[in-house]
Amino acid sequence: MIGGLFIYNHKGEVLISRVYRDDIGRNAVDAFRVNVIHARQQVRSPVTNIARTSFFHVKRSNIWLAAVTKQNVNAAMVFEFLYKMCDVMTSYFGKISEENIKNNFVLIYELLDEILDFGYPQNSETGALKTFITQQGIKSQTKEEQSQITSQVTGQIGWRREGIKYRRNELFLDVLESVNLLMSPQGQVLSAHVSGRVVMKSYLSGMPECKFGMNDKIVIEKQGKGTADESAKSGKQSIAIDDCTFHQCVRLSKFESERSISFIPPDGEYELMRYRTTKDIILPFRVIPLVREVGRTKLEVKVVIKSNFKPSLLAQKIEVRIPTPLNTSGVQVICMKGKAKYKASENAIVWKIKRMAGMKESQISAEIELLPTNDKKKWARPPISMNFEVPFAPSGLKVRYLKVFEPKLNYSDHDVIKWVRYIGRSGIYETRC
Amino acid sequence: EACPRITMTDSKYFTTTKKGEIFELKAELNSDKKEKKKEAVKKVIASMTVGKDVSALFPDVVNCMQTDNLELKKLVYLYLMNYAKSQPDMAIMAVNTFVKDCEDPNPLIRALAVRTMGCIRVDKITEYLCEPLRKCLKDEDPYVRKTAAVCVAKLHDINAQLVEDQGFLDTLKDLISDSNPMVVANAVAALSEIAESHPNSNLLDLNPQTINKLLTALNECTEWGQIFILDCLANYSPKDDREAQSICERVTPRLSHANSAVVLSAVKVLMKFMEMLSKDLDYYGTLLKKLAPPLVTLLSAEPELQYVALRNINLIVQKRPEILKHEMKVFFVKYNDPIYVKLEKLDIMIRLASQANIAQVLAELKEYATEVDVDFVRKAVRAIGRCAIKVEQSAERCVSTLLDLIQTKVNYVVQEAIVVIKDIFRKYPNKYESVIATLCENLDSLDEPEARAAMIWIVGEYAERIDNADELLESFLEGFHDESTQVQLQLLTAIVKLFLKKPTETQELVQQVLSLATQDSDNPDLRDRGYIYWRLLSTDPVAAKEVVLAEKPLISEETDLIEPTLLDELICHIGTLASVYHKPPSAFVEGSRGVQHKRLPPRSGSNESTESPDVTPSAAAQPTEQQPAVIPSQGDLLGDLLNLDLGPPVNVPPIPSSTVQMGAMDLLGGGLDSLMGDETEGLGGDLSGSPAIGAGYGTPAVMPTSLTAPLGGGLSDLFDLAGGMNMPSGSYVEPKTVWLPAAKAKGLEISGTFSRRMGHIYMDLSLMNKAMQVMTDFAIQFNRNSFGMAPAAPLQVNAPLAPNQTIEVSLPLNTVGPVMKMDPLTNLQVAVKNNIDVFYFSCLYPINMLFVEDGKMDRQIFLATWKDIPNENEVQFQIKDCHLNADAVTNKLQSNNIFTVAKRNVEGQDMLYQSLKLTNGIWVLAELRIQPGNPNYTLSLKCRVSEVSQHVFQAYEVILKN
């Protein structure tokens, strides 16, 4: 199991050092600094073995988090734990920065004592942790309060406490998708997939039982068997989900057997599910590049983008990034829409368009002057990448229902105010040129 | 949004302070004001964090322990955990507070106390903590119980005996049935850890009932708890395929968990139990289909987890290529992927490349070859070469792509391309030689040994088509002594080839290189090879031609495959560091933990055991049975075989780029190996079965000459042994010695020996009654021992033993008893009881009793294993005064279950490559060198558990000399 956990600043100074196992000595702290943080060459693996000691690290801005062990630990678990640790810290004190860590070091030690015991991760749900790690000391709790805390921390529903009350029962569902594309210069889709998340904010009283439904092809086809009519109607809109994963509140065995998504949600914001689709993806934009080398000192670039969705919808925050060679000396750009700028420090022309409706087309052309160089190596031509946001789900996912039952309290599904929103964003959306 | 923070200024504690700090802190710690005290403790902790020694404040800090302020208490505890070990005497001061806190009405405080006290590693204190711990294990509050469960593991780490004596292990086992899932999960974690340091202790006692409890808890506990439980489940061996299937069914839903570690641990359980399912089963197909999507999903996790996932997928693809065969696209490299992800993806792409997707793959690889990162580009170029070898239809396109890349003139791209083109020539002779001219243009730019060696090989191999081959080779010869060994050897062979092809013009050149190699070089391999060529050329040039220019064995399309036994073991470690490093835990874990080798369960319904490597259904090996040779990526097997550590050191962890470097070279080079190959053919040896190795210079290593020992081995042995003893199987039995003298056992004298007959071990005893009274009621028992040796039946002494009477008894033994490492390893402690008393004695059993009948390793696996076992595990021995020839040695050893895997003759010396397997599955590999006329043999042993080597050597001595 995890033998120790260290947090360093960018200089390699240790900010937090918590050792869980006797086989990890103080020298481990220095070993990581010397061999990884101060390493001459960039470290090429997130797992490093130094003198039979393994170090797992992740970086958040310029802060290094390192878990150390001498055993054959579950590596995936260690990374999941480090991410979780970052989430917990963020939820307690905001951004993970040197200043915040120094300001909260006592709290961090307290958290580390609670969420790792002898190197074994324990309950690390912030909802539960915040009930008793408050940095205010446990003030005269009643016996009931105490046992409520412990039963939540250890309980089957560790993510939610009892006795939550809201005047208005309300929930927000966000379907957030990131659409990824790799396209050849000729417009052939080399790979495309959508990775989506359903994020829920729930403000519901009591211990509500929820059931979530979407246009999952498998479910629709199952139901469709009854009425041919309905299956014909909805069959078109259903989507094939390649794979999905769920928050721990979802009953996985029920999903496995009936493919129904039922759960008691945590209070507040959390990620209900993640999914991935690869079929019938709506690619919101198409990028058509044209690069021409004019002699050894000039490049001509023309890029056309086409929006490919309903004309009534608007895409936002559109940004096209056209890489330029390292020996670029000057750039002239002309674009029909939006603003384009050559950013020398980023070796790219960045073209920004605030809004663009569906089924439109726009174009940029640029002339790139190059300095003559002796470098024999050809320019690698990195792909043209794109960022955008669209108000629909590129996978075609639709929320069909989210039913809420709370048998003990007197509110019903109809009393709950529900909001659903779809946002599609670009993930890695690249076209080679 | 962030929580409101109370102390926004804690960072001030980190400011470095001046001298006299300790003094000031001391005063503050003893202050009456609570706030001041707390501030002072915070300063102490901050100093501790940055590595200052604040142990001098121990008594002052501990004085602050008795407080109602929980925050302060936790800080003091933190300090205690750090310094208790260095101040054991003062740490006792803390005991009372722990004991008291364990009785606190607040469960959070009770848990805090039990959690902390387990971290105080002071022997004197631990026994005081037993009572509080016992109470906490039975606490009404689950939060306290789950903490206490972990505390047992902590205490066990400090004092294992104490934990056993106090019965905590039983309490821990009871907690597996606890009503609270988190308590169950922590108990499982603690028990698994303790069990690891006590192999065969049966501590976890997994049976269908406990498994059912674990599976129930699996649905209810935290994500971390699910990991503990799944990792524990993976160690279970279901009794049959039905049980395996029902567990798989209940584990499958975990594949949809958001936590990647839960998913990977579930994959581990499924991959392992799937071994037991029949492939004809519908369920087997369903399960295979279910595994792909979650594995692909792991690739959308954060980069570090992607890396872990990819390392695991690399294993899974080798074990069961069918799972991901349609998922090539997801492994395409993204421009912004971190380099470690890129390199791993590339590896998997090559493994998945097939005729169906080769066009796409090649287009990608070409794209990658223009990237910036040198290692990545090299790997991409090499991958193009692999595609050519793997998919014949693509070879032409690959070659033209490689030529395009050579035109870029980027130095490392050119060198890498030449190295792979050499392999393509090897695979498809007389097809692409038209490109040689282009390659020769780049001769001057090659500065890496591997590329130089490859180019030289090409020139030598195609000398007849290259007009100026002699000039080219001569140009290399000028700086002969500055070249690396790899290049020197290759140059020697190439010039000899050239000479054989164009003898008239190159006589001078060959003289020159032979004298450089034999007279001016300090390198014994170079000298040896030089001499071999020299003699060959001077005695029989026709034979030399046949040898040096012989046809080369095929090279295989699959590369860098992990040795099947290791692969199986790594599959059992999916998700863990072992699967990331691709090394067994014993390679990077110190001490007893992880030394145990895990194995896949055997497929049910057949007797075929997946444990023995030669029958391992290695999916990766299936399609390539006809292709014997493997392109090694680092280090040459033969180099290793001859114990020349020329290859790069085997690093832990493997640096991703290391697979790009070719390490050692082929020692015997194109010429000699062809010599061997030729001989084999003459003897009717099957070339396709020979594990030819080396990067395509033509380098088969171990030649299957005398394939197996004659069947009459046992018989001839009988004559050799001349002992006239009753030995049905022909294995050597030592004469009986007195184990228990009569004086020590009230008149009972026991002498005995061990024997192995028809696959069974016997303890042959003579019981002699030297007392005045009759002896009856005999019984025997063994203490735990290194190999789990135990009586398979009670001791049968039917009649009473009268005074002065001797009785011979043969006690059958098995090796399924409890295991404990003994010193010496083969020590056996025995208790014998009769109507008079119980007597104890100890004896040593010869280790060859444990050599099993199926200890003959497949040749190819032998080579891979030899390479895989680290060189520091190799031990060399001298067997003196032995006057047998190689065949007699082979026969003698074979009747003792030491099997000759291959034999070859090098300059009159006989080299025997042998394998044996112990009852507990440990393999020992041997190389026995016999020189005619020299009664001293050299024995080199390689074994993952090198402690057994000494004993194996002794066994060799005893067997050969008797």
Image (cartoon, coloured by chain):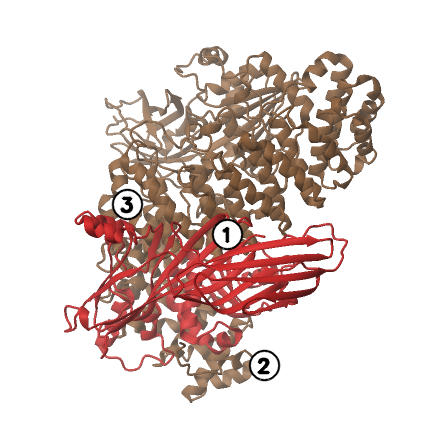
Task: Judge whether A94 appears above or below B608 on screen.
Answer: below
Alpha-carbon span between mark 2 and mark 3: 56 Å
Residue B17, numbered circle:
2
* Residue type of the residue flagged with mark 1: Leu
* Residue type of the residue flagged with mark 2: Thr
* Residue type of the residue flagged with mark 3: Leu
Q: Are marks 2 and 1 on the same chain?
A: no
| Quarter in which the N terminus of chain B is drawn | bottom left
Query: Decide: marks 2, 1 in contact (CB < 8 A)?
Result: no
Q: Secondary structure at mark 1?
A: strand
Q: Given the image, what chain letter belongs to the residue carrying mark 3?
A: B
> Residue A429: x percent and y percent?
49, 57
Give the colour of chain A: red
Camera-side mark, 3 or 1: 1
> Residue B499: x percent and y percent?
78, 20
Q: Secondary structure at mark 3?
A: loop
Q: Is residue B213 left or right of residue B400?
A: left
Residue B266, numbered circle:
none
| Viewer-proximal residue among B841 and A81 | A81
Residue hosting label 1: A182
Give neighbour class at mark 1: few <14, some 14-19, many 20+ (Cα, 10 Å): many
Alpha-carbon span between mark 2 and mark 1: 56 Å
The brown chain is B
Q: Are marks 2 and 3 on the same chain?
A: yes
Q: Secondary structure at mark 2?
A: loop
Task: Judge whether B913 appears above or below B684 on screen.
Answer: below
Residue B206, numbered circle:
3
Q: Given the image, what chain letter belongs to the residue carrying mark 1?
A: A
| Viewer-proximal residue among B744 and B931 | B931
Camera-side mark, 2 or 1: 1
